[in-house]
Amino acid sequence: MVAGDSLPGHVRQNTPIEGNIIYSKKTQAYSGQMTFLADKVFSGNGRSWNAQNVDNITPSTLSNIYRGFYLNEYFSDPAIKILLDRQIVNKDHIIPSPTPYLEEKAILSLICDKRYEEYLRIKLGDASFKYLRTVIPPTWIVGQEQFFSPGLPNNISSSLELANLSKSKRAYVLKSSGFSENSSWKEGVHFLQRESTDKTGLHIVQEFKKRLNIPMNYESEDEKIEIPMSARIRLTPYFSVTNDGQDGKLIAIKATGCENTDFIHASSASINTAVN
């Protein structure tokens, strides 16, 4: 599906020859992946990129940044605030761009929102609109249930009524949305078949389906032997859009496998690999 050189080739073609991938206290658990990206994807053929913790840098010496942190950390991490303030004032290169709505889960609900159906059908085309309806889990904004076109389950009229359904019919996830520190990773994610809690702020409810358990092996880091596991797999496709949004390209797919948890993407014990 994706050629082995697609990701480094695309990155090197569309980024400066040198720069830094910056991560924060919040994202330092992924420093190993960011170091791999800097060394094996961004660098090479005369290019030089490094992965660094924001606490170990001098912002005035940086010009090109790939941000391995969330924009909402601007309000919670002083080092991120200093870095972004300087980058924005100097109009230095920041990738991805500081665009808050890219970190907004509520956007996923628009494909199922009666208010936007006609507009999206025209903009996307009927075939693309129908396809997105099949791949995006049914999603609605809490408090906006009347605009959810498929209709709520069991003829209920509000998200609060999900608490009255049996656990088997409560296969939905409540996710914190909006520009907040709880709208990333497993933070602010609650499986409603396990609990019923009242949350404040902007939230979405999304249908949740358990994935199949796939047998796979991984190599022990210490003993270098293969260990079997039964993994739930999460596939993450990475697309890049260039030419002012006119050209799109699938540049990588990551598979994450993890046992004994539904929080596949946020588990510290997960195994990540590329899919060719």
Image: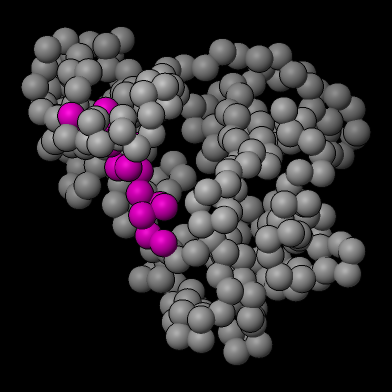
Residue numbers of the magenta segment: 99-114
Please indicate whether residue 76 sits to the left or right of residue 243 in the image.
Answer: left
Q: Is residue 64 above or below residue 126?
A: below
Q: Is residue 117 above or below residue 45?
A: above
Please indicate whether residue 195 sits to the left or right of residue 15 in the image.
Answer: left
In this rendering, does residue 184 appear at all? yes
Residue 149 screen position, x and y as percent: 19, 22
Q: Quadrant of residue 222?
A: top right
What residue appears at the point 68 percent right and 42 percent down from the top-left corner? 251
Q: Does the magenta stretch include residue 240?
A: no
In this rendering, does residue 23 appear at all? no
Q: Nearer the viewer, residue 35 or 94?
A: 94
Residue 156 screen position, x and y as percent: 11, 17
Image quarter in which the C terminus is found: top right
Please indicate whether residue 226 sits to the left or right of residue 90 in the image.
Answer: right
Image quarter in which the N terminus is found: top right
